Amino acid sequence: MSDVAIPRASLNRLENAVAAIDQKQMATLANIGQIEQQQTELDNRVQHLMAEFLEFVQNDRMAKELQLAETRIVKVRQELESTYGHYGEVRRRAVGVLQALDAALVTHETIQSTTESVMMATPRYWLAPALVALAAWIRDDRDLAQRALGEALRRDLDKTSLFFSLVLRRYERRAGAACWLGQFFARQDPTALHREFVLILDAVATGAFGPEAKSVASQRIEQWLVQLGSQSGFADSQRQRWETTLASLTPTMTGEYELLRKLSPTWPLLEASLCAARRNKLVIAHFVGIFDGPLEIPSHLRDQVDDLLATLVSRFDVEELPLREQEAELAAIIEARGDTEVARKRFAVIQQALVETVDFPTLLTNAAMHADEAGASRGTQRLAVAMSRDWILAAHDTLTASTRADVPDQIELALEGWKASVGRDSDHDGVAKNFAQHMDTKIGASVAAIKFTGGPLFSAVASPLVLIVGIASSSVVLIVAAVLAALYGVYGYQGLGRRREAAREAGLAAKEQACEELKGCLSEIVDYREEWVEQDRYAEEAHEMLASISTSQYELSRSDDARAVIS
């Protein structure tokens, strides 16, 4: 075996090349550490950006739904005006005729001409022949009055009966008013009442009926409640109805408890539970709004009855219902600021107030919760709530019990591959310490995973064999390759420390950020539980308020009726 001489210049070039490679490797390792840290920051930014993007998409969708609803509701209202606007002319004349007679400002001939003209202008509308009959009755034209009355009854039996009951009450014809009202009640089915029945509640609530008519109404309503209450499952069905109605008051949450929302798989349950607890204040606000303040009732009977007559004749008729439903649905979207899911839930409840016929308990619910759609006054609202008190209480207590049962005792947390359950009595410092240990273990595993493997290990193992072969064969190329492989293996081994340090620093940065997030999340858990307890306290306040309501408080009587009965 002969010695192989390697020129000094070649060795110098080889050493310089290896040194350059070493410098590049060190720079690369430093860059890798920075890249890992930047990658962690980038992941966080991407998640935040994704959340902002989804929020933007949702807001954009809601804005478009809101704009569309605002445009469509104008068209629906224009169609209502163009199709049924001529009904408004008849409605405006109804009470005007009575008040004009009171003031003696128009002649019987003018009234006759006016009522006959609207009769020709509004075919199929019940109020037109009713006004003709009223004008004929005023001037004592019995034949025309009977024929016009028959036509009005044919077009709408119930509204015509109520109209003349109120007119007779206006002129103190109590027996006649009670007779008309009795005929009205005789045709009513408590399981399928027409929408105008709310007017009866209004008259009872405001004391507009005389003693005879009020007695007829109160006795028949009481009979209905007894009759319906004797049916199997009736109480449960009313409780469930009011559960749905009260549940529609449940608010929504946006932009709150962000870290808890991000880190807890239990968040959907937590959100639903807190929203349900927050509902208690809204229930209180709704019913306080109904009973707060004095009930404004006209001091004069004629003014009071005129208000009821105006309500009766101004209520839209059955043929208008489809457009009125569209209007209410679009109004719900506008009220919800374009959130169609919230609007759908609200409209599902409001829609019950727009149907043609409902059972008596549903009518009470509609009057209590959706007075505008049901055409109920403030007095009617109060009476309807009082009549429904037991059902409302049962529904409220059931919802309260359900809310308390559904609040999660354990809140799950998950981040960086770590999972834990945080209970009411959990040591938050201990939870944070446990997470820190998890991160330390994760960093240790990440550092330990950086081993002397791959190309450097192969070079270190192969270099002696290549050197032996090169010397045996006197091959300069193999000897140089063996030296390079050995140097590459040495430098690779020496670079382990730098790579491990870079991995450790990146892991520590991720640990610090994750620990801050966990700390903030644990703080939000404390705030969440405190708020839930605070909101739940309002449930008892709502119960006490509802329990204090009694029906007798809201069935009013006029003082002049009492004097008339005594005399």
Image (cartoon, helix red, strand yellow):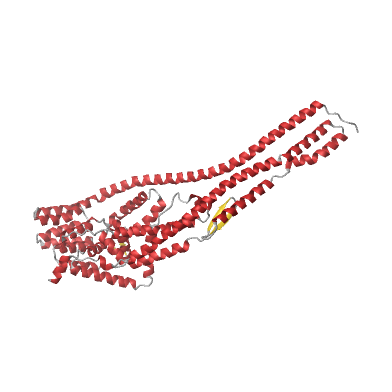
Give percent across and percent down for residue 424: 51, 60
Q: Quadrant of residue 313?
A: bottom left
Measuring from the top left, give residue 428's x and y in whole percent: 54, 56
Q: In the rendered image, is residue 59 in sight?
A: yes
Q: Quadrant of residue 403?
A: bottom left
Residue 234 vertical placement versus 261 (above, below):
below
Nearer the observer, 368 or 496: 496
Q: Image point 26% across, 66% down: which residue?
A: 553
Residue positioned most to the top: 9
Q: Is residue 178 left or right of residue 334?
A: left
Residue 351 visible in the shown view: no
Which quarter shows the N terminus? top right
**Residue lying at the far bottom of the rendered structure:** 230
In the rendered image of this protein, does residue 198 appear above or below residue 567? above
Judge left or right: residue 380 versus residue 268. Answer: left
The answer to which of 135 and 494 lies nearer the viewer is: 494
Q: Residue at x 82, y 37 (%)?
A: 466
Residue 431 pos. (x, y %): 57, 55
The x and y percentages for residue 302 are 15, 60
In the picture, the quarter occupied by the C terminus is bottom left
Q: Residue shown at 71%/39% (left/top)?
A: 495
Is 216 on the left or on the right of 342, as rendered? left
